[in-house]
Image: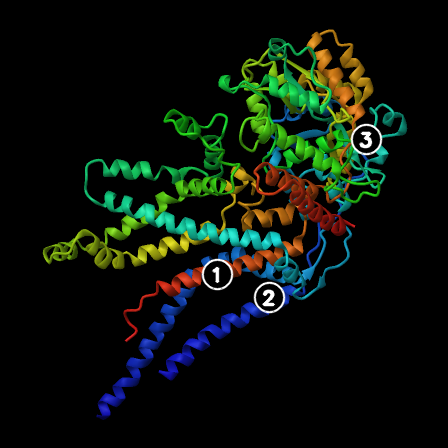
Amino acid sequence: MERRKSGRARRWITPLAVVAATALGLAGCAPSSGGSGGGSSADISGQTITVGVETGSPWQAFYTKVAPEFTKATGVKVKFLPVPHESMQQQFLSDAVSGSGAYDVFTVDQTWMPQFASKGYLADLDSILPNSERSDFVGKTLDTATYDSKLYSVPFMVHNLVLYYRTDLFKAAGITAPPKTWDEYRADAKQLTDQAAGVYGTIIPGAQDVEVSTRLESYIQQAGGDIVDAKGAPTLDSEAAKKALTMMTAIQNDDKSSPSGLHDLTDIQGQFLAGKVAMAFVWPYLYGMAQDPRQSKVVGNVDVALNPGDPDQVATTFSWSFGVNSASKHSAAAKKWVSWSTSSDILKQLSLSQSVPVPRSSAADAVAKEGTLNDGQKHAFSIFNESVSKSATMPMTPAFPQYQTAMSVAVSSVMSGTQTIDAALSEAQKAAESAHDSAK
Amino acid sequence: MATTTALAPRRRSGSNIALRRNRLTGIALTAPAMIAIAITVLFPLLWTVSLSFQSFDLAVDAPPASFVGFDNYARVLASPGFLKALVQTLGYVIATLVLELVVAMPIALLLNRATRGSRVLRLIIAIPIMIAPIVASLAFKFLFSNGYGFVNAALSFVGIDPPSWFASVWLARGTVLVTNMWLALPFVILVLLAGLSNVPGELNEAAKTDGANAWQRFTHITLPLLKPAILIVLVIRIADAFRVFDSVYVLTGGGPANSTDVMSSYLYRLMFSSTDFSGSSAATVLFVIVVGVCAGAIFFLLRDRTHKA
């Protein structure tokens, strides 16, 4: 018996020793991020660059169509790799960390641009945009692509949420103009709600989702506040934030002017296009969808307006831009793409073909003068541009994704009745402060 | 006697050569699989363990990594988000394993009878195995949707006030449970069916003759003989259950109020939202330890005790 026991023990010792030795050996190995890329500004003709784009997005459709013009002009071929929206940050981060340079150009969502820039994953683009070009960008739109005073991407679209409303329902209710204040918004939503007919005055976001956090941030700015103070420290438990959540819960729970449930962007735009909601805050791309009978049951009965405010009629601006992977092996060609794809003429074509606002004033002016636009489209574009010019952007901090998570948890806690407004905001503030301290 | 002693050494060396040849053959045949497992499983695991003891940043030109001992573990264990996700994951795992067995057993028993249509039913039941979890999660998200979901439409049709599935903590947890059960039940049913096919019919017949009722036959004959099949189900399903991610990500995003947050979604956020690679390495190791302990407990509880004497 004893010989069998010691034999069993011996069988375990050797493999265990090997595993332990390997682990100790690996502990001495340090990970490192990807290296820097290459590619001089010498002749770029004949190179192929890979651009990561959002799957199914208007810009994927547009840039895929116009890329042959770029190839004709520069000799650089362009390959597009579509990535689902939810996976973009993860995929691009994985590529950046590995340093493989699989993507030469990232389609950059502003929310994680500072995170990438702070870690050196995006190339400095100051050199490709001289001052003469910068003055063509509307208002503070280039702020959305700047981190630590350096330009790390160039925006092709800067937008914010606008108010979409049903002109037919407004007319039937005798409401002559869209709301300009929160009080008017709440009163109109109540008046437009007809639960028997399955129509609600508005729809309030509540899901635990980063998209929902952009709405809370917009409401906070409408209430005259912001999510950070002048020094950049988070202020999620401010009076403006409490006011915003109080307004949301009042409309949802007291007035019942919003459908029951915790809503995300899919619900918000889906229910608006299905004709179940009279007012909704959505991005500019919805305008084109609302006029398409294949996607909308409210064609011809939709208009847009500035967000109602208390007191400011604003909404947080965000941009989509192109940035160059610092590990790209074709950085000169990639920078050429960024410069070309955000030029005035190309942005004018993007705006016209996809009904999206663009950040260059020369392109916006050209669109406004375009004879092919109808009055509704011209009005919509003017609202999109006015809304962006009046509004501020998000804080450009690497901790912003964590601020978004904290805000989305707070919204879902309050809207589900799991926490009070004060408790939820206090928790969100602690999480944001921790993220802020880690990012320093 | 001299002849017997003289013969014995020749037989022993012949059997040694055969033994050594068998051992070498075994090693040669299993070596490719062992090498593949070492590369794809063992190396990443050990690498993660080593990372968990270091502080490092994967920024370009970041300072070199430094050994920090158990600091990462202390930080993760002190995080309320980690503990909440761990407790919720354990609760989900226990609930889903129990419910899957309780629901799958009667279905397997029914299908085991040679009734008409049982073959077609087995095929229908196996369909969810062919559906990707992310696709199923998207489908269930729409099914449970307030505004246009089939579930609420059906409830309204029969006069029941439909709830907001994702707005309530326990209902949201229920949607995640139901979605994963839909995906997992076919596997559990099929394994139990395979186990049931090994239960000799004569034992049940004999017990019936002796006056045992259906419940007695099930608990004293069928269930003990199904132990190996149940063990297979529990070991495989426990690993799957701990890894749940798709349904949480798609259906609830971890909400409302982080009430459906699980270890996988917590790790995902730590890695990609906070870019805390050191912390996520430590959290991963802790996660593996928890899964290992639970799997070990199942092996221990369901071990074969018949040869102990």
Q: Secondary structure at mark 2?
A: helix
Please state which of residues B121 and B99 is positioned toward the viewer in this rendering. Answer: B99
Q: Nearer the viewer, mark 3 or mark 2?
A: 3
Q: Is residue A307 above or below residue A224?
A: above
Whether residue A392 sits left or right of residue A212 in the image: it is right
Q: Amino acid at mark 2?
A: Ala
Residue B304 seen in render: yes
Residue B173 position in % (x across, y down): 48, 43
Residue B114 position in % (x across, y down): 19, 42
Q: Residue at x 35, y 57 (%)?
A: B231
Tell me the crowding category of disc 3: few under 14, some 14 to 19, or many 20 or more residues within 10 angstroms, Cα based: many
Q: Is residue B19 above or below residue A58?
A: below
Whether residue A237 sits left or right of residue A132 in the image: it is left
Q: Amino acid at mark 1?
A: Gly
Mark 2 vs 1: CB contact within 8 A? no
Q: Is residue A366 above or below residue B78?
A: above
The quadrant in which the N terminus of chain A is found is bottom left
In the current view of this chain or complex, which residue is farthest to the bottom? B2
Residue that badge 2 annotates: A23
Q: Residue at x 77, y 45 (%)?
A: A118
Q: Nearer the viewer, mark 2 or mark 1?
A: 1
In the rendered structure, find residue B292 and report the number of the disc placed on it. Answer: 1
Q: Secondary structure at mark 1?
A: helix
Residue B85 position in % (x across, y down): 55, 51
